Image (cartoon, rainbow, N blue to C red):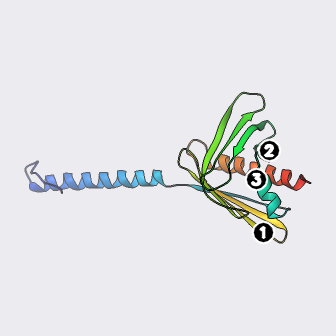
Amino acid sequence: MIILLKTGPHFTDGICFCVAEIKFIIFNYSYKLKAMEKTVITVQTSVNAPVEKVWNAWGNPEHITKWNSASPDWHTPRATNDLRTGGKFSSRMEAKDGSMGFDFEGVYDEVRDHDYIEYHMPDGRKVVTTFKNNEGKTDITTSFDAETQNPVEMQKGGWQAIMDNFKSYTEGLK
């Protein structure tokens, strides 16, 4: 409810003031909604291996520590993974020189073996990964909510590099 008060020699002065305030409130609300919109980034690869082999390499901590890095100067010294709906995962990602590192973790919201993984991270961002059998190959697509600290292209490049490492590692497994 808006109550108009006469603020000047003319009643319309109060109306103009209120209209200006309403425009300002609508602009701010619109700006805040725009800032809250999510950016979803997608990366993908096709692995020359059957989906069962791909699924095992993706979900087994012993394998995760061997492929989960975006560049040769980073590594994942430890990983845990309870790959089931409601399960949790955690990977410690570090620069090999020890200069920096972080824990990457989340909780699985939905897991369908050999097909679909959805999880959320502690900050609320969502990630969905699909695995599609394609004539003996496996197409993997991951879509994730971007974070706000790093540029979108940098995030996409990092996640794609990890996906590429996964492909190379998995195709090299016996």
Point out which mark residue 141 bears.
none
Task: State whether residue 61 is above or below residue 84.
Answer: above
Disc 1, SS: strand
Quick one: label 1 or label 2, which is nearer the N terminus? 2
CA–CA distance in space, label 3 to label 1: 15 Å
Q: Residue at x 89, y 53 (%)?
A: 173
Seen in the image, is 149 located left or right of residue 162?
A: left
Q: Residue at x 68, y 49 (%)?
A: 82
Task: Decide if residue 145 is in sight here.
Answer: no
* Residue 135 in the image, given as x and y percentages of width and height: 83, 72
Query: Which residue bears the numbered disc 1?
Result: 133
Q: Amino acid at mark 1?
A: Asn
Query: Which residue bears the numbered disc 2?
Result: 62
Seen in the image, is 103 located left or right of residue 164?
A: left
Point out which mark residue 58 bears.
3
Query: Which is more toward the observer, 4 or 91?
Result: 91
Query: Which is more toward the observer, 33 or 70?
Result: 70
Q: Quadrant of the C terminus?
A: bottom right
Q: Are marks 3 and 1 in contact (CB under 8 Å)?
A: no
Q: Residue at x 74, y 33 (%)?
A: 95
Q: Residue at x 42, y 54 (%)?
A: 33
Residue that extends furthest to the left in the rendered view of this protein: 9
Tag in front: 1 or 2: 2
